[in-house]
Amino acid sequence: MIRVDQLRKEFGHGAQRAVVLDGLDLSIEAREISAVVGPSGAGKSTLAQCVSLLERPTSGSVIVNGDVLSELSERELRVARRRIGTIFQSDGLFSRRTAAANIGLPLEYLGVTPAESRRRVAELLDRVGLADKAGHYPHQLSGGQRQRVGIARALALRPSVILSDEATSGLDPEATGAIVELLKELRDDLELSILFITHEMDTVLQIADSVARLDQGRIVESGHVLDLLADPTSSLGRALQPRRAHQPAPADATVWAVTYGSEPVPADWVGLLAARLDTTVSLLGASIETLRGTTTGHATIAVSTRRHDLVEVEFHVLGLDARRAGSEALLELETGVVA
């Protein structure tokens, strides 16, 4: 479990003082993957460094597995850090060490016997799907394979918390998908709490249970991913699943912006809506997918009737949130920007 209470981090003094984190509150439970997104310079990497106390917060507290890290002695902090594994953007591997030797490095520092170290490293290589790459050097591995070695090394000391700082940045889509699936599997098998820092919104959809947007050192919006996607007023939800450009509507039709809500929606809802209203319903554009067994997304449709009251009733019956799209709303739909 990770909990951050009123975390503040400043660099410099006086006129040169810069506030990088400004009163952050964040909680990640066991078996939860929580993503933090935001623009460059928002403070994402500083947050990860403060959680492990590689950077000491100016004020506030960081609690990991019940320990208030800032209150621990140096000796106690060294022990507590063993329960925190870190995966870096660049894999951070030593070029002159094999995959097995890189993974075994934390065990060497702790004085683990060579026999026990070899057993643990072999177990980890197998877990990340690289049992046949033990003797390979980093330059002999693909980017995704190097990142898997980095994940194995982060697991060497059996942590309960993982900090992932842009771990999929620069990887191709196939490698990114493989890393995402591996982290979800490890979360479930080892009951990990994972803080997943990224700027890749597509990856957030694939991996995260919850997400927070950091901007200028503050969390400006947060929530469970599925709740944000179902909320048509959520800026973060729109950023996670942006609206695409759509086809023009027929001249006699009214355009509606439709969002999947929290209730189940029939797969054939467009046909059902047309049948219930006894009119033509045109699908102009949509972005719909299934996440963790729940269908989410949004669509832009055109309905050839002016009985807006009836249309609204039918949307409600079908479990959809909808609103009429005038000229300003159409611009919003196409750009994802709220006026």
Image (cartoon, rainbow, N blue to C red):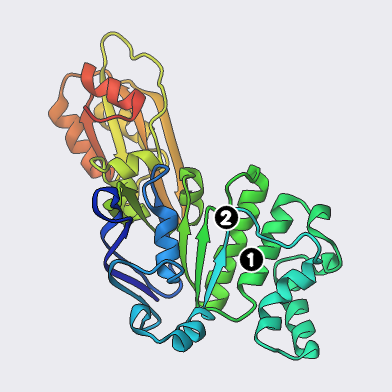
Residue at figure coordinates x 62%, y 57% from the top left: 179
Locate residue 56, reporting x and y percent: 38, 69
Residue 22, labelled with which disc?
none
**What residue type is disc 2 on?**
Ala
Query: In the current view of this chain or complex, which residue is farthest to the top?
Result: 251
The foreground one among 167 and 20 is: 20
Evaluate whether residue 164 shows in this view. yes
Residue at figure coordinates x 86%, y 67% from the top left: 135
Residue 151, labelled with which disc?
1
Q: Earlier in the sequence, mark 1 or mark 2?
A: 1
- Is 113 positioned to the left or the right of 198 in the image? right
Q: Under tag 1, what secondary structure?
A: helix
- Quadrant for residue 224, please give it: bottom left
Evaluate whether residue 209 shows in this view. no
Q: Which residue in the protein does label 2 denote?
A: 167
The foreground one among 196 and 218 is: 218
Locate residue 155, reporting x and y percent: 61, 74
The foreground one among 203 and 58 is: 58
Above or below 239: residue 121: below
Q: Under tag 2, what secondary structure?
A: loop
**What residue type is disc 1 on?**
Ile
Classed neighbour count for the residue bearing mark 1: other residues with Cα under 10 Å, few (<14), some (14–19), many (≥20): many
- Quadrant for residue 49, please give it: bottom left
Q: In which quarter of the image is the N terminus?
A: bottom left
Cα separation between marks 1 and 2: 9 Å
Query: In the current view of this chain or complex, which residue is farthest to the front?
Result: 14
Above or below 12: residue 28: below
- Is 204 positioned to the left or the right of 148 in the image? left
Residue at figure coordinates x 71%, y 82% from the top left: 108
Query: In the current view of this chain or complex, which residue is farthest to the left?
Result: 309
Q: Are marks 1 and 2 in contact (CB under 8 Å)?
A: yes
